[in-house]
Image: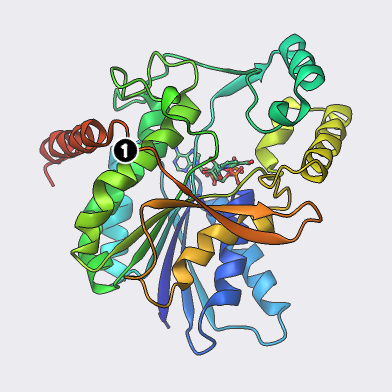
Amino acid sequence: MQGKVVLLIGANSTLGLNIAYRQIESQDPNDALTFILTSRTHERAVEAGEAIKRFNEQRETPREIAIFPLVLDLADMHSITNACTEIKKTFKEVNYVYVNAALGVCSGINWFKAIQEVITSPVQAVTDPHYKIQQTGLRSKDDMGLVFQSNVFGPYYMIRKLLPCLYLGHAVIVWISSIRSDPTYLPLDDLELIESDTPYEGSKRMIDVMHLATYKNLKSKGIYQYVVQPGIFVSQSFNVHLNIITYYLMMIMFYLARRWGSYWHTIDPYKAANSAVYVTTFKDRDFERQDLKYGSATFNDGVEHIKPEEINDRGKMVVGEFLSSKEEEWDLKLDV
Ligand SMILES: NC(=O)c1ccc[n+]([C@@H]2O[C@H](COP(=O)([O-])OP(=O)(O)OC[C@H]3O[C@@H](n4cnc5c(N)ncnc54)[C@H](OP(=O)(O)O)[C@@H]3O)[C@@H](O)[C@H]2O)c1
């Protein structure tokens, strides 16, 4: 069984699983689905598959689904080429790609600053916080900026190498960005985000610009690429730096922010996954704009909706050229 093939990069994450659930719900009832689920460990990829199967079986009419766990470390170019070889060997075509994986390098919270921000600007403090401390200067074993490689170049390179399968599958590619991707986060003289003290946000900004630089060329091959953002939702990744008290305080702040009009506080990861799957359901692809960032949003009573936004194209050419020169460099190094 193959049916429609969905490559879900970063499957066993809070959002990743919910993207899979919504994909199961939104797909044409007659389509079987095969999920290629990636994780850095086989166990976590298998676990994601179990969760997705459980979700499917609880539905009134379970869909025919198959799971293909795949080990992939985006911070390792050999792992990327191995994963691509495995996919090309097993699947003639791939129909959907979700680039959901992201490496955050938060090493702690500046509590003094956090309290100050919460008191002076509470909604801002839980929307665009400036109290998270991120590690700087991190490089991968391939000697690239670690966050740049994991969040941008790794998946970009993978997509480039999978083009034959994507072409045959008339694929839809969905990149998960963030609301925290202001142009100021991306220093054009440090595109690998090595010196940056906000590499995570810089990588999300780079995704936005990379999308603008590449989607037209992909479209000419019949491949449709979109960039979306999930709003702000509760993720398992939050637990690392919070205890039970700070976790519940954060939750209270999230709900208050939404009550006070912050439509980006989706909170529930299922609602956060709305925009990612929404863009795959467009009936007339040539009619819908691809140069927008589609956001998952909620009204203040929690009802979900989609909120598209314009993307600032500053640095588009520079980023596009940088990524294609990096691709050439790695084609030579890996001899592909
Ligand atoms: N939480 C929010 O409010 C929020 C807001 C805006 C955007 N987002 C975005 O939403 C997406 C999902 O967030 P989440 O909180 O659900 O994620 P998460 O729980 O933090 O999980 C991160 C995922 O990324 C994968 N990953 C990390 N580094 C990787 C690497 N080097 N190679 C391959 N995979 C790697 C992990 O895979 P394994 O650990 O299984 O290997 C895991 O599946 C991310 O793109 C995030 O930036 C989240």
Residue 121: name its quadrant: top right
Ligand 1 appears in which quadrant? top right
Residue 278 picture location, percent across and down:
52, 66
The answer to whether one can see residue 47 in this image is: no
> Split into 4 quadrants, where in the image is the N terminus?
bottom left
Q: Is residue 176 left or right of residue 327?
A: right
- Tell me how many marks there are: 1
Q: Is residue 287 above or below residue 312?
A: below
Q: Is residue 50 left or right of residue 336?
A: right
The answer to whether one can see residue 252 in this image is: yes
Question: For the residue labelled by badge 1, is the local secondary structure a helix, a strand or a loop?
Answer: helix
User: What amino acid does circle 1 point to?
Assistant: Phe
Q: In this view, does 137 lie to the left or right of 171?
A: right
Q: Circle 1 sits on which residue?
A: 153
Name the residue located 34 percent from the left edge and 39 percent from the top edge: 209
**Foreground residue among 64 and 182:** 182
Residue 335 picture location, percent across and down:
11, 42
Disc 1 crowd, CA 10 A, few/some/many (<14, 14-19, 20+):
many
**Foreground residue among 77 and 298:** 298
Q: In this view, does 184 lie above or below 44?
A: above
